Structures are given as C-alpha cells and as structure tokens.
Image (cartoon, grey):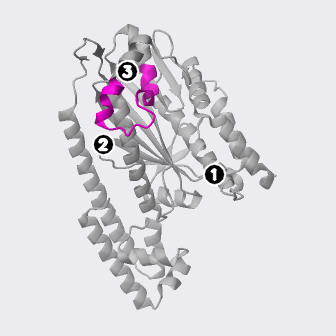
Amino acid sequence: MATDEVSEARKLLGRKLRGLREASGYTQQELADLLGYSRPRVAGAERGESCSALFWQGCDKLLNTSALTSVYHEIEEIRRTEARKAAEAERFRRAVAAADVSQIKDDSGSALAGFSARSHKFIAAFIGTQAAEEVASSIEAKASQAPQWISCLSAPFAHSSGRCELHLWPFGVAIFHLVEELTMPNITSLALWRMRSYAENLAWATANLQELTGLDEISASYVLSAYWVTEPGWPENTLDAALRTICTPRILLQREARFLESEREDAEQAERRILASGHDGRGIEPFGLSGLSVGYASWSGVVYHPMSPNQALAESDLVACELATQSIWAYCEHINRQVESGLDPIMPEEHGWRFLRGARSRLINPRPQETGQHRSMRDSIVKTSGLLGHLDQAIDIVRPSQS
C-alpha cells in the first residue's frame, strides 16, 4: 500500500501529465491510442494511480519531455526506501519477540518441541507476456536461474517480513519468492501462522502486481511453501513424524478451521497424537539420504533438514527446483483455466506446445552433474505437485492450434 508521501507525489505527477497533455492538444483517448494503452489507464495516471516506467517513458516521448519518467523514478526511490525501513523495523521486532525453541509441556507432562526454520513461499500469478516484459524492465530485473532449469529474470522486492525477490518468465508468469526466518514453539503454531499468512500474502502479491502492471484483473492464485529446518527440537524417535507433519501442517487443523487461536488447544492435542503414534505418510514422497538429510514433498509443501550440511543438498538447489516447477505449473493452470472458461487459448509460438514439451523434459530428465540427492528431490517435488498431468493436458490443448 502506498504511503501518504508516495500517494501525494503520484497525484502531482498525474497533474503534470494532464497539463502537458492538454498543452499538446491531446484528449485522454487520443493519448491512450498513441501510447497503446486504454483511456482509463491514462485517466488513472492523471488521478495519481501507479503506472509502469514504460508508460511514463511513452508519455515523455509523445509529449516531448523527460520530466515525467524522472519524477516517476524519484517516487519509486521514495517507495523503496520506505519499504526497506519498514522491513528493517519488522525484522528487528521479530528478532526481539522470537520465541525460545526449547521444549514446552502441558499439565499432563506431554511434550511439544520448538524448532527454527526458514520458510520459502512461492506466490504465483499469470500476468501475461507483455506485462512480464514491462515489469521486468521497470524493476530492472536481471537474468536468473541455472541453465538446466527454466530461465527467467528477477530483482529484489521489498517485503516487511523477510527477503523477497520477484521472478518473471517470458511466458507470462510472475512469482514472488519470500524468505522468512521462523522460530516456532511447536508445529501447531506453524500451521496457524501459515494459513493466516497465506491470505495476507495473496492480497499483498495481487496489490503489487496490479500496481506494477496497471491491470486490475491480475491476481495471485496460490502460495506454495518449503521449509528448511535449521534447528529441530524433537528427539530422534519423533523427528521423522515431526518433519512429515511440517510437510502437511493442515492435518492438525479441523476441516472447517478458521485458523484462530481458539483452535490451538485441539491442534496441539492432534500434534501430540501424531508425534506419539507416527505420521502415516499418505501423499508424501521422501527425498532425504540416510544419515545426511531428511526431506519430504507433498501437494501442500516441502520440508528439508540437512543433518550434514556439507554433504546434503544446498538450499539454493531446492529453491531453483521449486521456482522451475511452480512457474510451469502456473502457466499450465492459466491455459487449462481458459479452456474451462470456454475460451480457445492463443499462445505465442515460442511458448506453445513444443516449449511445454521441452519444459517437461527439463523437469523430469536427470542431468550429468546431478547427484542422487538432486534427482530424488526433483522427482519427489514434480510428482507431488501434480505437474506432469497438468503439463500433458496443456500440451494437448495447445498442440492442435500450432501443428
């Protein structure tokens, strides 16, 4: 959300645009036609709504000035500075308030263990190829990703609760990768935080993507989580059940849970029962290596604990795999939803069925430099995501129109 200072600066910029437009003799519709935007977009800019750098560059060119883009960048610098300050203040608050990771007990003597982890959230949306290109230019995104995955552009993006990067793929997908440091007294706390924060994350991502693109119809569609457990507090005999539960934390909550603190007691009892009797493992694929690491993937998330960090997977390996998987999943979701809405999807030739077939190959075929751990991780993540069926359906949809 824009601060008062940023909002006022945007209104001043909008009035400046209106003055230059009128001095040049253009109506809003005429200027919009020349720019390749809609009249409401020009009207919104003049009211002080956010627009991309490309919009202001186009206005400068048509109105024979350089002042608009210059002011836009000044406003963006103010916005980024304020966001960084807010993020620093929030990180300081969280550090001060961080809970102890020692074990806690209830009156009956049963123990729940705390833990520390890094939460990786992948917040995905389809924004379209043109919007992806424009946003990448406006945020000065740079080349990202290892070549064996699906290449994209990325840039840091301010968030109040952790490190964040916005990744953009040329086939129109945008993913915010948000990293948050967690210290939780038990898994129930993670489950409640996770479900409550998802709604906030989706709203935040949607608002920022709409602001970046100027497209009100864009919305973030889902959040996928991965947890890199750094300090497990459970004894060895319950570690496996605990990590499986982190992989599927929703099982601790009632079917119609509202994710409120009033539900904590029931959830903690469920956590105790699972730790005592074990997790049945349904819907979960393991990818750890005995003695070195424990890793699990499921439809709802991924968890990994490197017991021997120098021999286990690198955190960046897991992140790269999830970014590639989720980018193609979001793209296929867009294609399949168009069909469900009664539309015939029209995809650029370079990102049509041949591209999807190539992406499928890159995601499922091993690479010469891969270790067994890498291959097991990739197989588990791709399998539990349901991506292959999603991909095959998208290929079948697009192929007839591009054969």
Task: Classify residue 372 as left or right of residue 25.
Answer: right
Q: Secondary structure at mark 3?
A: helix
Point out the image quarter for the N terminus.
Answer: bottom left
* Residue 258 is a magenta residue: yes
Identify the secondary structure beneath mark 1.
helix
Q: What residue is pinned by disc 2?
A: 161
Q: Is residue 324 left or right of residue 45?
A: right
The residue at 34%/41% (across/down) is: 163
Q: Given this view, does label 1 or label 2 mark the residue nearer the observer?
A: 1
The residue carrying mark 3 is 271
Tell me where the magenta segment starts and ends, as one range: 243-268
Residue 188 numbered tag: none
What residue is disc 1 on?
Answer: 337
| Residue in front for this viewpoint, 14 or 384 | 384
Q: Nearer the viewer, residue 271 or 74?
A: 271
Q: Which image quadrant for residue 190?
A: top left
Q: Nearer the viewer, mark 2 or mark 3?
A: 3
Alpha carbons under labels 2 and 3: distance apart: 27 Å
What residue lies at 65% left-to-right and 55% top-to-bottom? 338
Q: Amino acid at mark 3?
A: Glu
Marks 2 and 3 close (CB-CB < 8 Å)? no
Q: Residues within 10 Å of mark 3 (few under 14, many from 20)?
A: many
Whole-angstrom CA distance, mark 1 to mark 2, is 32 Å
